[in-house]
Amino acid sequence: MKIKQFLISLFFVLFALTSVVQAGGHPAPATDAVAEESAEEKVYQPKSISELMGSFWETTGINAIIDIDDGEMTAEPAGPSAERPMTWFESSLGRIIMIILVFILFYLAIAKNFEPLLLIPIAFGGLLANIPLAHMGGEHGMLGVIYNMGIANEFFPLLIFMGVGAMTDFGPLLANPKTAILGGAAQFGIFGSLIGAVAMGFGLQEASAISIIGGADGPTSIFIANRLAPDMLGAIAVAAYSYMALVPVIQPPIMRALTNKAERQIKMGVQRKVHRLEKLIFPIVVIMLSMLILPESTPLIGAFAFGNFAKESGVVDRLSDTMQNSLINIVTIFLGLGVGSKLAADKFLVLETMGIMIIGLIAFSAGTAMGVLMAKVMNKFSDEPINPLIGAAGVSAVPMSARVVSKVGSEERPGNVLLMHAMGPNVAGVIGSAVAAGVLLSIFK
Amino acid sequence: MKIKQFLISLFFVLFALTSVVQAGGHPAPATDAVAEESAEEKVYQPKSISELMGSFWETTGINAIIDIDDGEMTAEPAGPSAERPMTWFESSLGRIIMIILVFILFYLAIAKNFEPLLLIPIAFGGLLANIPLAHMGGEHGMLGVIYNMGIANEFFPLLIFMGVGAMTDFGPLLANPKTAILGGAAQFGIFGSLIGAVAMGFGLQEASAISIIGGADGPTSIFIANRLAPDMLGAIAVAAYSYMALVPVIQPPIMRALTNKAERQIKMGVQRKVHRLEKLIFPIVVIMLSMLILPESTPLIGAFAFGNFAKESGVVDRLSDTMQNSLINIVTIFLGLGVGSKLAADKFLVLETMGIMIIGLIAFSAGTAMGVLMAKVMNKFSDEPINPLIGAAGVSAVPMSARVVSKVGSEERPGNVLLMHAMGPNVAGVIGSAVAAGVLLSIFK
Amino acid sequence: MKIKQFLISLFFVLFALTSVVQAGGHPAPATDAVAEESAEEKVYQPKSISELMGSFWETTGINAIIDIDDGEMTAEPAGPSAERPMTWFESSLGRIIMIILVFILFYLAIAKNFEPLLLIPIAFGGLLANIPLAHMGGEHGMLGVIYNMGIANEFFPLLIFMGVGAMTDFGPLLANPKTAILGGAAQFGIFGSLIGAVAMGFGLQEASAISIIGGADGPTSIFIANRLAPDMLGAIAVAAYSYMALVPVIQPPIMRALTNKAERQIKMGVQRKVHRLEKLIFPIVVIMLSMLILPESTPLIGAFAFGNFAKESGVVDRLSDTMQNSLINIVTIFLGLGVGSKLAADKFLVLETMGIMIIGLIAFSAGTAMGVLMAKVMNKFSDEPINPLIGAAGVSAVPMSARVVSKVGSEERPGNVLLMHAMGPNVAGVIGSAVAAGVLLSIFK
Amino acid sequence: MEEVNLLAESFKFMILGMSVVFLFLIALVQFIKLQAYLINKYFPEAPPAPATPVANTSEDENKRVAAIIAAVSEFRKNKS
Amino acid sequence: MEEVNLLAESFKFMILGMSVVFLFLIALVQFIKLQAYLINKYFPEAPPAPATPVANTSEDENKRVAAIIAAVSEFRKNKS
Amino acid sequence: MEEVNLLAESFKFMILGMSVVFLFLIALVQFIKLQAYLINKYFPEAPPAPATPVANTSEDENKRVAAIIAAVSEFRKNKS
Ligand code: NA
Ligand code: NA
Ligand code: NA
């Protein structure tokens, strides 16, 4: 009851004051209202109820999909100047295909647990991007706002990389540093597929953007695709995350084909204990090296090293914790939706997408193969035995790939746990891909 | 002591290096300093201490409020071109009225627990927006920066909606789907009050923006107000949240007036168990329907469905958790402050505000009444008994309205728990309002 | 196996549909590809492998540091128009000095625990800003994006202040309000060092920006530096945080020099219990006062008061919790990196930096001294005894300074706990600095 | 300002709006019924509560939230 | 650059600045005293802890937060 | 589009890229070995776990964070 009194007196006071004061005060609001209304009346023509229903029908999605010649424009975050009219395919059948594809991605993410953290936001972004008339990927649409906020300027992939850095433990690499070489060999996945992409007819810059899928690293792929071939961003990101999820399917046959049973049964020694200072200094060493050799790679490696340094410093745990949790989660949501905007039919359903899918698969396979072969070579020349399987982990796809290695290893010889040995090449593969990315950027600078 | 040595040697090294090197190096800093200083001297005229005090007095807020003719400009996030001089009322008495209003909102939020999560940031934003001379709602002010970041482009309301989606359980609606119709009937609150607003003299577009208060849904109201009548955003948002908080006062008398005791005592059966897959597919069904029927509603429904889908998928709990917690909290703070910037006296204290308040109350009442009446009709024709009280929950105002229904129901018949049955119309009301919002947008597109 | 089938059929469907449809459809992608490629060929000239290696060498950081005359431009977040060519010193030796300085900051933060939450992000930002060729502080670089997002518009310092407000307990100040005067006296650190800075040759505006270091408050320093002398932001921020970390070294000798043993042994009474309403109303009183006296200080005080009010209201704990945790952590990371971008050699290694360091030390010392002296005077005229040591806490540097007071006090007289009594001047010092900042802004408005 | 035609227009808006809202929700109700029928026919849930492994996992996950550190290390797996 | 009038100006700034700071804080002290007087006169807190319902809710909440605040207070050191 | 010179260029890219990647990682390996040697020589870790005070602090901090997180998760119940 007291509440009611409050409200009534609030009304009363407001009304009394405003009406008294407005009389002698500023008359603008009234004129504004009139002006606005006349503007409205110009815009809005009275319609009969059936005309109103008819014009409503024009705004439905059913009509947009059925009507072939509606002249809908593509949605571009860069604004209307970058837009073009959609073809009839893009505005009708294309959307349907893309929505089916989105449902397949949902199925894989939920039922098969394929990289759901990225695939669900990407696929949902793709769903939204294919809604007719809503123009959600445009400059003022939700997806376009997100795209301009953090993808066009490459900010979100770097923040993800920062969080991944804060989650990464370089201990296994520091304990057995020479396994880093395996993370280098696997980058053949990038450069080998680059040749393949050129052979397939892509230009050099596009081919480079596609080949980065072989880096098996999400943020790096998005970063490079955005720089070198932004039109292909959606296909490249989807390919990268899909194949990362398919690592348990793609890698084992290649690993088995290139090794014999004796090699796969090799046991590796216990890793030495790594000093805390080694872990602390390591990100600094990496960033200094990339500064000296390859400044183009420093955005990626710098963000990664910052996250790792913050974690290993041990004095800013609340920041490191934020990088690993709320910040990376927020950015993951936005990054996924923003990338998903590139799954609009007019951007995704082009012939290039087929090529990107094929080259991505080649890249993963080539990287795996070269990693295993290099591990075989190293095993020959090393004092300590090296199980060639761990070379496959060099593609990165952290930590899926290392787990696959461990699984295959223990199948061949129960009790042989290779996980920690595979983590070395695995994290080295992340650095290797960032370096490879830097080389590609420096070429096209 | 070691620290001191460090500092001293740091000083020494820096000093030695910079002074030696600067001698032969780049002389710009020195000239810069000179140039800057001369610029300063032009700007800054030496003053006697009493002149200094006098000019300080000019910058105090007391002077700004007392001095009638100071030509202060209104603060607009769109920048100086959108600004106009304040009237004497706006720059003096108006501010005082608004500050009193803000204190009333604080009181209601804290002592009465009226939607404090939104009212406290909004009211505090209003307090800051009414500070003289600080221009905090302007392009470079804190509130203006926030406004441009996420309200002018409607990003924040959508993120809130995403979080609300991730918090919503559609189980009760899925268990008894026909109660969704009640969430439709209650949208009469929107369209009935639209007629009222036009009758009161508002233009069609403004009337539509105001009538959305009847949707009883914060983000939807802000989204639509921003599109159709941005000048009224403050009043509409405050009205929407205030009446949502007042639901326990507004609804029960209407509910009792339109039903007889026997109806209010109706017991409803136990709800069936809902399959997990139903919950998972539901957000997809909603988004597909809105795509087909009403693409204009897809930003709102899409964000809502994304949040719900992420939660129900069960594979991205860390994202869903972030949507429900850190992300929605951060955005709530910003949204509140940004909306509060529209409580500046020059924007809020116009005659229209009175009309908005009155129409808002009509809208809530009309929505409640129509929900109850529709439930009575459904009870007549349904096999299972339907307690007409649950129709009131169709206005949304989740979950306050469902709770009010449950409270009234158990007062009429102790032990009769209607909460779960009221949740169905309640969440359907959210969808219904978003659809209604889409219709309004499509009309004025 | 089912996965493989899925993938294959996905490929097939996509390929069939797109190739069939593209034939009759929109031919743009193909022409696009051709156009893009020809553009590429213009850009990219075929090179022999040794030419390629050579041009790669040009992009290495080693070359950039060695090569004196490479005409690299400074990185400016405001874009290319604000850039100028680097001197040879800035692009070579200067970088090395700055990187060494960054390592010293890392050492102090990690080994000595000197304000690590800010110094680690700032120093890492400084490391990234000094990487040759990467241009990370430029308009499109990671640091430049951050700078433009929240430092150029002063948004981040205000968010930090909001979080600090939500963490601050004004109970001790409310229990013994007259100790607030000590927080005023310590602001002599600001204005005394302002005279010193002018005497040293700085212009009035620059001198004001530097003197704010005496406020011993991070966000206030960054806010004011950004307004009055953005070029000096890096040096001012580093000085402010470094001296705040050095409070346990700087303050005790001054405290002991200005007091006798009897004074230092004074015991202070038990504080009265503070009513919850007092805490709730206090932030409102502060904001109203600053509105009336000094609107220029309201961005800082307003943000601070909002945070504190949200906490004390007790009804928006989830927002207050977010301000104190995920939001302030995220902003701290960004603020640090953004400020760090001002540690680029071309911005930091100027003669002014030496002056800033010296004046900062003077400011801290002068503030401490005046706080202690004022406390001595108050002790003479007060009914209740006041231990002059607590005056030193008036510089703010919350809560380090209050702890130092408590430590010195209990050394002089075991069991004499001054902590709560020192917290009063300590938090008053925060308000005092914000007021002083407002005065400086109002002078140069 | 009170012109008759504006009132008439707003009345037509109401007809249109309420029709679309009801159309939408009726369609939604039908789809919900259809999916409930199909799902419960083709994917019947086993009688006891913790039957399906997926729902089970989700439950476990919720429990794990209490001890976030453990859950976080679990989640790290999904990042690369 | 060392001009006498700049020094004089900065001295005047000091006079102005310290005056305003003291003025502000003295006013603040008076308001604090006034509100303490008024609040404790008109809203006296009942002797036992769970007296007023509002304070009670707040107390409960405070207890729940107590663990957090205690733990966080360590971290507060580094913030200002 | 299949011009021979593009293929040749991409082959050269491969040579350059793989060289730089290996160069980088080999340098990295050498630095890791060097730092491991230097660190374990000049800062040998004491045998028992909680040896260095810094690491100790970090452990405490982790424990404290655990307490916060546990408390926060408790607190989440109040969220709406
Ligand atoms: Na990789
Ligand atoms: Na509603
Ligand atoms: Na201070």
Image (cartoon, coloured by chain):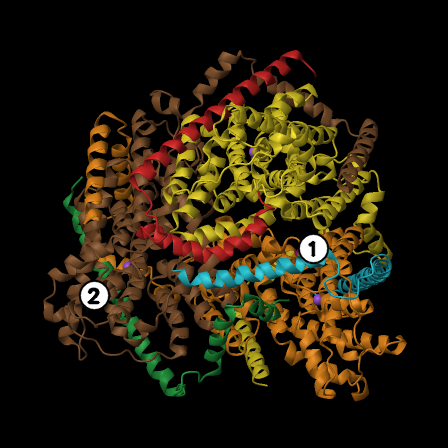
Chain colours: A orange, B brown, C yellow, D green, E red, F cyan
Q: Residue B444, position in %: x, y?
A: 31, 50
| B266 relative to F21 in the view: left or right | left
Please, what secondary structure does the residue beneath circle 2 have?
helix
**Of discs 2 and 1, which sits in the foreground?**
1
Identify residue for label 1: A313
Amino acid type at mark 2: Gly
What is the x, y in percent for residue A211?
Answer: 69, 66
How many numbered discs, if any? 2
- In the rendered structure, which amino acid carries the disc numbered 1? Ser
Chain letter, disc 1 residue:
A
Q: Residue at x 33, y 21 (%)?
A: B68
Residue C345 lies in quadrant: top right
In the displayed structure, does residue B219 sit left or right of residue A358? left
**Chain containing the residue with disc 2:** B
Give the prevailing secondary structure in the magenta stretch.
Answer: helix
Which quadrant of the picture is home to ligand 1?
A: bottom right
Vertical arrangement, residue F52 with respect to residue B45, above or below: below
In the image, the residue with mark 2 has its CB under 8 Å from the nearest atom of ligand 2:
no
Mark 2 in CB contact with mark 1 (< 8 angstroms): no
Mark 1, Cα crowd under 10 Å, few <14 / some 14-19 / many 20+, is: many
Q: Mark 2 points at which residue?
A: B391
Instruction: Please state the horizontal and vertical placement of residue B305, each as a whole percent of the image.
Output: 40, 65
Q: Give, as a single range, the part of the protein colored magenta.
A: A302-310
